[in-house]
């Protein structure tokens, strides 16, 4: 418990003053009532709109405190330029009881007359941040200490109020979560340590607010804006990336020299601490940006969830159509639009008085730097309800987010005369299996229905037409009787050789002759195509009612050096009939299975006693792995830091193994996260639940 001492500064002729020897901020009791005990007991951290109590210990010989007879004025201030007009300063006298709507205080004296308990209620609309607290008695001011004020999901008057206790536990207090990646057909959850209550993290979160350009240019206005979670979320969306400022993370999707590969991170704490010490951290990708944003939001008291959208459109020209361009030989022409295999952002819970009650609830923000908004690389917050209903005039950046989950895909071929002709497309391939961690468990919760109406439904098409403002292109070719699909092998683990097939079926009444092309290319999760790793072609005649197959062998020798750590390969099958200008296309992105990372404890986990975790992984590749390492991290287990064991090289088909010791510092249920890294295999994660027992010593 931290006590704030105060010298006796009052003279005898100050008839109305009491002499305060010291002030007890009663951190332990206040923290428990304000759900901030996980921050520790070093200082007072409270949530707005809810009373907290400080205890004034009077000096021997001090005048008695008499309610209504002692002239107390309490003063709270935040920011470098506190002003009442900006709500960064408040002065208030003692009342019979505290108010639920504004700064207020009441006080009682104990029977011994030696202590005074002062109950202070903050406004549920007060700016969050570090505050000073002092008492003014007839012009004599006495500092009582400092406290940090956070948003309060437990307070009905707070804009972030959430009625469900189980949801508050998940979206504000949970320090461990799942981030979903892969493809819509192979969704994989990766564990993440948010660690918002780890030592020093809250200070770093407040530093992020103080380092943002809006604070630098107008500190008074910025600190005043911190009463509004919409404003704070938009600031965080800009500051988690470093594109326009010295924000937290540098984004990189190609060359990772000079930094940490995004797949290596397993928690936010290490990233935030590195940023606080030395500036922007290299490197992040969408799931890292989102996970760090979730940590900061929860630390500040804003309920937050990490959301993954499978088949996520990046619509650069804002026409709600992703246009894939091909030449007459079926080769892809580069363009600005793309569809990411998955993209990760955050939803934050708050009211939207600027838009109306119907838009309260989850708000989407995207800290990954994709496009600028008002001249800054940030996105949101936009109401999820506005996205679902196609209300694209609602702030902020609703059109871009709407396109991410609703854009149509159009395949176009450029003829020799320069004309573009649509030959294929989809209204259902974007915005699928939108996922977040379920409340209270590690299961995946599908929230697609919160973002959009069912694909192909009347409501979904009405919303799309309402939002669409582009000129439609005329469709030619690709008669409905010609059908193309891709069939995959059963086992496609990275390192293996396997075969895939393109199957062309002719449902016409007449035979068809065409060029049959089958491509395989490495692809990043953001849809950026890499090197080719397989190609097959044939000129085929397909009689009516029959099918023709084209096989493609994918050997590790061909794809191993081409794929990224995402382990994704895009398969594209195209048929071309230049005589009739008929084109047909099928496309699939496969994610190669990864080896399993096994974690087990070697013994029982006991508070403040060393225990070891054994981590093992079988190298599935036909080549050695170099620079291999295992890393573990867990809140209350590894002293808020990752612990790494480097094991060198691992031969083909051999087992990598390491034993890592750690000393649990918290009793009860904890989560231990593990990561394997090497030159060829990265981003392989797992976790186990650990129950730490109290020591008998």
Image: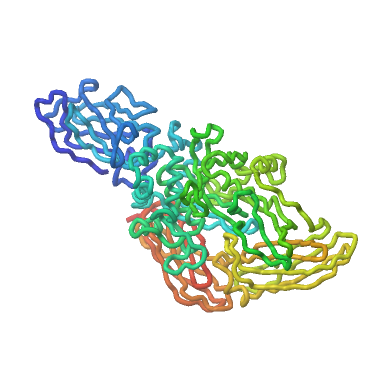
User: If the image is split into quadrants, where does the N terminus sit?
Assistant: top left
The picture places residue 638, in percent across and down from the top left corner, at: 39, 59
Look at the image and tell me in which quarter the C terminus lies: bottom left
- Which coloring applies here? rainbow
Instruction: Please indicate whether residue 276 sits to the left or right of residue 472 in the image.
Output: left
Residue 685 visible in image: yes
Identity of the residue drawn at 57% across and 57% down: 181
In the displayed structure, does residue 58 sit left or right of residue 652? left
Provide residue 321's location: percent of width, then percent of height. Answer: 65, 51
**What percent of the width, then of the height, locates residue 200?**
34, 52
- Residue at 31% x, 41% y: name it: 79
Q: Up-down: is 6 above or below 373?
A: above
Q: Is residue 207 left or right of residue 479?
A: left
Q: Nearer the viewer, residue 680 or 611?
A: 680
Q: Residue at x 51, y 50 (%)?
A: 366
Q: Eyeballing the image, is 687 above or below 435?
A: below
Considering depth in this image, is 407 or 550 the residue closer to the camera? 407
128 vs 595, nearest the viewer = 128
Residue 451, quarter of picture: top right
Residue at image position (56%, 43%) is: 398
Most extreme residue toward the top, as rendered? 68
């Amino acid at each position: 418990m931290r006590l704030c001492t105060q010298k006796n500064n009052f003279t005898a002729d100050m008839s109305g003053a009491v002499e305060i020897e010291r002030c007890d901020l009663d951190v332990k009791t206040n923290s428990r009532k304000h759900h901030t005990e996980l921050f520790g007991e070093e200082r007072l951290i409270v949530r707005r709109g809810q009373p907290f109590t400080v205890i004034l210990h009077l000096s021997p010989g001090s005048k008695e405190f008499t309610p209504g007879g002692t002239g107390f004025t309490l003063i709270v201030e935040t920011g470098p330029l506190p002003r009442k007009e900006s709500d960064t300063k408040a002065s208030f006298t003692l009342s019979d009881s505290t108010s639920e709507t504004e700064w207020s205080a009441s006080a009682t004296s104990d029977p011994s007359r030696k202590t005074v308990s002062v109950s202070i209620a903050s406004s549920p609309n007060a700016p969050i941040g570090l505050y000073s607290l002092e008492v003014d008695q007839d012009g004599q001011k006495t500092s009582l200490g400092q406290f940090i004020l956070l948003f309060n999901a437990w307070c009905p008057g707070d804009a972030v109020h959430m009625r469900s206790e189980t949801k508050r536990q998940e979206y504000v207090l949970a320090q461990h979560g799942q981030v979903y990646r892969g493809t819509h057909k192979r969704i994989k959850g990766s564990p993440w340590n948010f660690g918002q209550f780890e030592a020093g993290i809250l200070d770093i979160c407040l530093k992020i607010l103080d380092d943002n350009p809006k604070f630098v240019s107008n500190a008074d206005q910025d600190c005043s804006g911190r009463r509004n979670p919409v404003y704070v979320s938009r600031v965080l969306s800009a500051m988690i990336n470093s594109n326009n400022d010295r924000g937290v993370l540098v984004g990189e999707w190609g060359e990772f020299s000079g930094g940490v590969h995004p797949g290596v991170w397993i928690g936010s704490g290490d990233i935030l601490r590195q940023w606080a010490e030395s500036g922007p951290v290299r490197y992040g990708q969408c799931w890292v940006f989102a996970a760090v944003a979730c940590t900061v939001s929860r630390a500040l008291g804003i309920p937050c969830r990490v959301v993954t959208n499978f088949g996520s459109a990046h619509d650069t020209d804002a026409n709600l159509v992703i246009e894939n361009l091909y030449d007459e030989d079926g080769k892809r022409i580069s363009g600005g639009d793309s569809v990411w295999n998955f993209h990760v952002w955050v939803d934050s819970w708050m009211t939207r008085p600027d838009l109306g009650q119907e838009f309260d609830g989850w708000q989407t923000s995207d800290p990954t730097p994709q496009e600028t908004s008002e001249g800054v690389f940030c996105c949101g917050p936009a109401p999820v309800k506005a996205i679902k209903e196609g209300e694209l005039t609602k702030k902020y950046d609703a059109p871009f987010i709407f396109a991410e989950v609703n854009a149509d895909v159009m395949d176009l071929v450029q003829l020799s005369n320069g004309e573009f002709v649509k030959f294929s497309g989809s209204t259902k391939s974007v915005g699928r299996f939108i996922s977040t961690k379920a409340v209270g468990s590690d299961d995946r919760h599908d929230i697609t229905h919160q973002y959009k109406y069912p694909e192909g439904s009347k409501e979904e098409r009405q919303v799309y037409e309402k939002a669409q403002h582009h000129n439609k292109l005329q469709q030619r070719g690709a008669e409905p009787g010609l059908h193309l699909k891709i069939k995959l092998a059963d086992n496609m683990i990275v390192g293996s050789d396997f075969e895939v097939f393109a199957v062309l079926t002719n449902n016409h009444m007449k035979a068809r002759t065409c060029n049959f092309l089958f491509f395989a290319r490495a692809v990043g999760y953001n849809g950026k195509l890499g090197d080719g790793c397989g190609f097959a072609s044939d000129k085929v005649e397909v009689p009516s009612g029959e099918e023709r197959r084209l096989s493609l062998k994918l050997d590790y020798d061909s794809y191993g050096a081409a794929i990224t750590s995402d382990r994704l390969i895009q398969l594209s099958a195209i048929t071309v009939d230049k005589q009739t200008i008929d084109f047909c296309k099928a496309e699939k992105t496969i994610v190669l299975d990864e080896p399993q990372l096994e974690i087990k404890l070697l013994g029982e986990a006991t508070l403040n006693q060393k225990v070891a975790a054994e981590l093992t992984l079988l190298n599935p590749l036909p080549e050695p792995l170099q620079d291999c390492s295992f890393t573990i991290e867990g809140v209350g287990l590894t002293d808020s830091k990752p612990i790494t064991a480097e094991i060198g090289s691992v031969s083909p088909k051999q087992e990598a193994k390491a034993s890592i010791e750690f000393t649990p510092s918290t009793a009860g249920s904890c989560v231990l996260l593990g990561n394997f890294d090497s030159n060829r295999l990265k981003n392989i994660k797992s976790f186990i639940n650990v129950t730490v027992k109290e020591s008998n010593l």
